[in-house]
Image: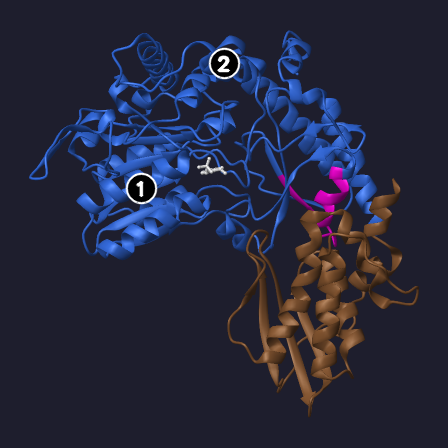
Amino acid sequence: MSTDLHDLYQEIILKHSREPKNSGTMDNADGEANGNNPLCGDRIVVYVKLDGDRIADAKFEARGCAISVASASMMTELLIGKTINEARAEGSRFIDLLTSKDPPEVADDDELAALLGVRQFPARIKCATLPWQTLAAAMDGSETEVTTE
Amino acid sequence: MAANGSYPIDRIRGDFPILSEEVHGKPLVYLDNGASAQKPSAVIDQISKTYETGYANVHRGVHYMSQIATDAMEDARRKAQMFLNAADEKEIIFVRGATEGINLVASSWGRANLQEGDEIILSVLEHHSNIVPWQIVAEQTGAVIKVVPIDDAGIFLMDEYEKLLSEKTKMVAVTHVSNALGTIVPVEDVICLAREKDACILLDGCQAAPHLPVDVQALDVDFYVFSGHKLYGPSGIGVLYGKEALLDAMPPYEGGGEMIDRVTFEKTTYAELPFKFEAGTPHISGIIALGSAIDYLNGIGFDAIAEHEHGLLEYATERLTEMNSIEIVGTAPEKAAILSFNIQDVHPHDVGTILDHDGIAVRTGHHCAQPVMDRFDVAATVRASFGLYNTKSEVDALVEGIKRVQEMFA
Ligand SMILES: Cc1ncc(COP(=O)(O)O)c(C=O)c1O
């Protein structure tokens, strides 16, 4: 196998996709949103529970590929405990990391660095970004479904 | 390969320039023919030849080039007529593809013939393009859609179909071959039963036309559609066959140039068939090159193609059945060369990306057939679809690729 496939399917990503963190449904969520990739039929639901302006808990249910599940899992791990504004900023930073023209600079200990391999696979970028867009909608209390198209 | 070993696979592969391309440093293994087939030089060269030596607008000019282009286009219409064994060339309408053909019938025939409470029968196997146009016209007319179920193998359930048929049935629109599963629908029986109720029949021949000989007169079908790009021809061109009497009685679909007899602001009279349904300047070079694709297929012969592709399907089915943790989706005994499957615990997109890395092109997703996916309770499948230029060693490459996916996700 050549190196770039390994960049995409790093051990940490495979691990998150096999045993996702915070996967499941949530009763009495303060926010909930659906994400849909109409091109491939993948779907995700993201739930958030707020404590003031802080994300007290986040969960997701996904029917999707390893990349989208790993991205959702890592996202919830990273954002639980953050304020809504911090979470939004992280979300924008993440989408920038994947879609910026120039190769981004990331710190060695950046949890999101593992997902940067997706940059080499343009067809898969939406798989990684959908959970984040859906979380943003869940925090907004937006009723409309998030779609990648 | 053909059992008699005479199938000229090397020559055929040589006819398709793209097959010598490399993808990620590996030879291209193109197993996505169900989505679109690659083009032989005969088709590619014809497109340049039209523009280099015989191009102008058609049916309009008195000048030489217009005549040459018109003749070439009408020649292609006769080739399509013979390809489907239509009774008359007037019955061949050039459209953008199957999608436009179905929309034309649903809109023009549907709005003229459907009334509240009339029923349209479709099947679970349909591509979205043979569902949505009918939903639109049902909405407009108050007609009702009924859906023929399939069994666990993906077989069209004839007895359920029979139960759905009634005096209310006005249209039966079903696929000839399922694009998601490969199931060949026994359309002769479908048509016979519909005839007893005087229902009209449209067959979606997108996946059938590249694999089996089609004879619209023997079938006694009312409408038949296919897309050129799946038939080794250009994209953006396809054929709608319709029985002359039906087409004659239908109102135009689009208005414009080419489709008129005489226009005044008081009243416009329409052109004869087929031009009544061909408003605007057509895809001239595409039509002519579709004719070249048909010539190319006839040159190899449908029996030889069908035998070759069937051999590939059997071999691939056998090899995948031997593997662990593979589920084949769609196991009807009568199938065209389409193999849909899933690898346990690996999402089709991940399979697709990893196979692509080995130069293997397969389709992953719902194949524009979400009702089929729902029937099998899967979000998506991996689909390998074989064409006349594929080989058993390409099936072997697929099998090796699947093993690498399994190792990676083990
Ligand atoms: C069975 C079937 N019907 C209809 C279509 C639509 O064809 P097109 O997109 O060429 O109009 C396809 C192609 O994907 C198909 O496989």
Inter-mark Cα distance, 2 to 1: 37 Å
Q: Is mark 1 within 8 Å of ligand 1?
A: no
Residue B143: % across, % down: 25, 54
Circle 1 is placed at which residue position? B172
Residue B270 is one of the magenta-drawn residues: no
Q: Is residue A109 above or below residue B224?
A: below
Circle 2 is placed at which residue position? B46
Give the drawing colour for chain A.
brown
Which residue occupies the extreme left position in the image? B266
Residue B349 is one of the magenta-drawn residues: yes
| Chain painted in blue in the figure | B
Q: Secondary structure at mark 1?
A: strand
Chain for mark 2?
B
Q: Is mark 2 within 8 Å of ligand 1?
A: no
Boundaries of the magenta span: B340-356
Q: CB atoms at circles 2 and 1 under 8 Å apart?
A: no
The residue sitting at 70% across, 81% down in the picture is A85
Residue B169: % across, % down: 24, 46
